[in-house]
C-alpha cells in the first residue's frame, strides 16, 4: 500500500496510517507507535494487542461435538466476551465444560437460555512460552506412559492416558488465542508457531485415538516399532530446546525406516497390531512435518 507524504510545519513530513490496522489494535490519538529503520524501510509497530471483540453465537440444536467447535473457535480467535444462546440442559453442560477448558474464561452471567462467557485474565508472552513447553512435555509423556502400559499389557490404563489429550487441547487453545491477540514476540514467527501448535494438537489426538482403539495386547514386533517411535519422539522434543542438524537428520532417517517397517508389518491379521502400526505411521509423518517448520527457524 502507498501513502503520500504531507508537509506539516517547516521540517516535518507526515503520513496517514491505514484505518483497518488502527482499528485492529484499537489505537487512538495520543497513543504511541514504534518506528524502526531497516535499511530503506521504516517499520511502524505497536505494543498494543489486537482489539478484542464481543460476540454472540447460537448453539441451539447443535450436537455436543459441534457446539464445542463453535465455542472453542470464538475463544481461539480472541473474543473477550461471548454471549451464547442455547435450548437444552445438555448444551448448558457443554457451555460450562467449555469454560472449564478455556484458560482465563468464566461464566459471568446466566439467564433464560443464554450465558455470557468473559475473559477475566488476559494473556502474556511468558504464558505462551511456558505453555508451549508444557504441550511438548505432555505429548512426550503420552508416548512414554503408553509404551510402559503396553509393555506391561496393562490395556485398561491406556484409556486414562488418552485423557491427557484434554490438557493438551486446553493449552493449545490458549496458545493459539495468544498468537491471534498478540502474535509471537518475533512477529515473523507467528504463523510458524501457529502451524506447529495446530500439528502438535493433532499429534496428541493421534495418541488418544491409538490408546482408545487398542483393546488387547499387541505383538512383540509391533511393540518394538512403538519403542523406536517413542525414542524418536524424545529426540524430537530435544530439538525444540537445542536445535542440532545431525539430530534432525537422525529423526528423518528413523521416519524413513518406520515408514517401511510399519507398512511391511500391516499385513499381520492382528487388528490391535494394525491399529498401533497405523498410528505409529501417521504420528511419525506428523513429527516430520512439524520438524520441517522448526528447521525454518534455524536456516
Image (cartoon, helix red, strand yellow):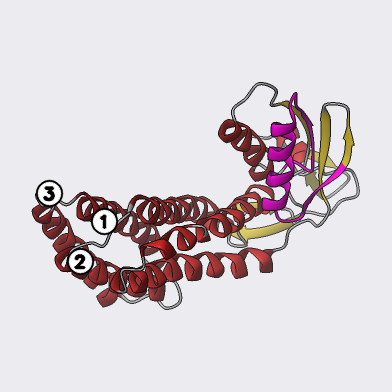
For residue 27, above or below residue 20: below
Q: Sequence-wise, which precedes: disc 3 or disc 1?
A: 3
- Range of the magenta residues? 79-108
Residue on which the image places disc 2 = 225
Residue 101 drawn at (x, y percent): 67, 52
Q: Is residue 86 magenta?
A: yes
Position of residue 185 in the picture relative to residue 267 (left or right): right
Q: Which mark is residue 276?
A: 1
Q: Nearer the viewer, residue 160 or 68?
A: 160
Quarter of the image for residue 223 reads: bottom left
Mark 1 residue crowding within 10 angstroms, few (<14) / some (14–19) / many (20+) = many
How far is mark 2 from mark 3, CA to CA? 17 Å
Residue on which the image places disc 3 = 269
**Residue occupying image coordinates x 79% and y 43%:** 80
Quarter of the image for residue 13 reads: top right
Q: Is residue 80 magenta?
A: yes
Quarter of the image for residue 157 reads: bottom left
Mark in front: 3 vs 1 = 3
Q: Sequence-wise, which precedes: disc 1 or disc 2?
A: 2
Amino acid at each position: 500500500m502507498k501513502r503520500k507524504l504531507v508537509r506539516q510545519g517547516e521540517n516535518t513530513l507526515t503520513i496517514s496510517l491505514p484505518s483497518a490496522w488502527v482499528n485492529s489494535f484499537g489505537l487512538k490519538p495520543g497513543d504511541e507507535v514504534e518506528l524502526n529503520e531497516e535499511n530503506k524501510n521504516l517499520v511502524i509497530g505497536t505494543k498494543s494487542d489486537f482489539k478484542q471483540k464481543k460476540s454472540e453465537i447460537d448453539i441451539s440444536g447443535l450436537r455436543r461435538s459441534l457446539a464445542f467447535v463453535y465455542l472453542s473457535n470464538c475463544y481461539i480467535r480472541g473474543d473477550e466476551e461471548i454471549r451464547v444462546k442455547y435450548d437444552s440442559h445438555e448444551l448448558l453442560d457443554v457451555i460450562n465444560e467449555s469454560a472449564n477448558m478455556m484458560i482465563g474464561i468464566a461464566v459471568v452471567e446466566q439467564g433464560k437460555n443464554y450465558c455470557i462467557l468473559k475473559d477475566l485474565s488476559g494473556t502474556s508472552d511468558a504464558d505462551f512460552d511456558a505453555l508451549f513447553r508444557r504441550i511438548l512435555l505432555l505429548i512426550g509423556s503420552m508416548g512414554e506412559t503408553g509404551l510402559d502400559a503396553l509393555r506391561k499389557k496393562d490395556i485398561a490404563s491406556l484409556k486414562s492416558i488418552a485423557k491427557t489429550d484434554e490438557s493438551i487441547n486446553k493449552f493449545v487453545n490458549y496458545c493459539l488465542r495468544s498468537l491471534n491477540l498478540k502474535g509471537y514476540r518475533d512477529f515473523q514467527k507467528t504463523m510458524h508457531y501457529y502451524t506447529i501448535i495446530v500439528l502438535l494438537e493433532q499429534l496428541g489426538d493421534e495418541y488418544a485415538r491409538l490408546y482408545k482403539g487398542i483393546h488387547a495386547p499387541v505383538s512383540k514386533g509391533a511393540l518394538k516399532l512403538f519403542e523406536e517411535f517413542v525414542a524418536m519422539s524424545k529426540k524430537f522434543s530435544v530439538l525444540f530446546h537445542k536445535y542440532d542438524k545431525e539430530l534432525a537428520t537422525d529423526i528423518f532417517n528413523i521416519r524413513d525406516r518406520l515408514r517401511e517397517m510399519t507398512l511391511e508389518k500391516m499385513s499381520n491379521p492382528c487388528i490391535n497390531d494394525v491399529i498401533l502400526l497405523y498410528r505409529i505411521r501417521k504420528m511419525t509423518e506428523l513429527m516430520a512435518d512439524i520438524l520441517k517448520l522448526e528447521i525454518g527457524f534455524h536456516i
